[in-house]
Image (cartoon, rainbow, N blue to C red):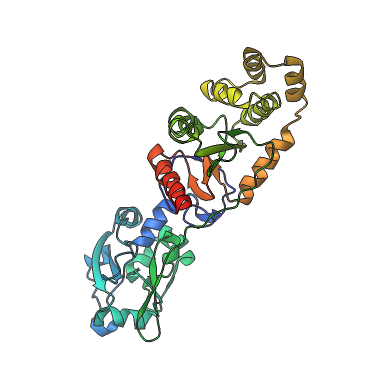
Amino acid sequence: MTRKHKNELVINVSKKHLGFIGIAFVFFVVGFIAASVMGTTSTPETTGSVINTPTQARSVTLTYIVDSSCSSCFDVSVNKQILEQYTSQSGMSIVEQSIDALSEEARAYIEKYGITKIPTFILDKNASSIASLMQVWPSVGDVASDGTLVFRSPEIFEDNYQTVEQDGSFTLVEYVEPRYNVTLDADDPIKGDPMAPVTIVEFSDFQCPYCATFYKSTLQQIESEYVDTGNVRVVFKDYPLSFHENAQKAAEAAQCAHDQDMFWQMHDTLFENQANLTILELKAYASGLGLDMDAFNACLDNSENAAEVAADMAEGIAQGVGGTPAFFVNGRFLNGAQPFNLFQQIIDEELAAREN
């Protein structure tokens, strides 16, 4: 599931998520995936070559090779506007064409460039002059001997595609959404019925604005629709980002409150007062909640729960979490402050699967 999201990224991003592309591409992954979706190419020798006039040299030909009979295959043309961000930097425009994979013209491309997966796209040799594109291209494709850029990695789109067999037939490769086995600790804060059929594990940072957005909108809807009815339990794990100066102690403060069975009350208070999370303010919130202040102060001052926070962080990193908020719904990954309807869709799917 590659989806647009709002979250705060850290540099240590696993390639499990963000379209299964590694850390080196975090900052251009949106642009590049779209660029990947729109490839371009010059016409192969079997159909005649393109003569580059001065005008044509300022354009890049983007050729899609698509099996029109594969209705479940991903759409390679959906992100053309992102590829245009590359070409426009060089003052180039894009000229698109689409060729049915069953046609003789497509067969010529497939044979000439050794294409083994479709849908795909190729970019003509003019694209090789775009420095920003060439920096990322080796991770998803190659450059043919005639300078054409050939896309080779449809699997990064996390959707269905086809392999090209030796006899020229196509075999569907169906995308299977991965499920991650997140380790839960006995002392993790839980909201809802511990035996609920659907578990949402949330990795969060009390100073992250997108985490606060989730708390103030989506979480409350999940609670009323699913937690209160016994269908969902929410498990909280700390993931304080290093560039949030108060996030670590805020996480520890929530865990200190958890020691007194007041985690969720502190959780709500911290998100409601996200701009004010100094140690003095954390202690004031604890006092306002009626906590045993001697125990709380000792816990916070001595960092008694720092190891608990670190363990949550380690689990998040092990699962490929690269920012906050991040969620696993019965092991299905959701990245960022997603709207309620997306959680609703996945939760309903999980509940329906359980009934069947």
- At x 51%, y 36%, the residue is 230
Residue farthest along the front direction in this orientation: 355
Whole-percent x, y for residue 17 in the image: 51, 53
Using the rendered view, name the quadrant where residue 162 is placed.
bottom left
Compare residues 86 and 81 and report the one nearer the observer.
81
Compare residues 192 and 152 and report the one nearer the observer.
192
Whole-percent x, y for residue 134 in the image: 43, 63
Look at the image and tell me whether residue 9 can be seen.
no
Residue 234, compared with residue 178, is above or below; it is above
Total residue callouts: 0
Q: Is residue 183 left or right of residue 345?
A: right
Whole-percent x, y for residue 321 in the image: 57, 47
Residue 161, compared with residue 313, is above or below; it is below
Residue 325, compared with residue 95, is above or below; it is above
Using the rendered view, name the quadrant where residue 188 is placed.
top right
Using the rendered view, name the quadrant where residue 348 is placed.
top left
Quadrant in which the C terminus is drawn: bottom left
Q: Is residue 61 left or right of residue 275?
A: left
Look at the image and tell me whether residue 187 can be seen.
yes
- At x 45%, y 61%, the residue is 156
Compare residues 122 and 187 and report the one nearer the observer.
187
Whole-percent x, y for residue 212 in the image: 49, 29
Residue farthest along the bottom direction in this orientation: 167
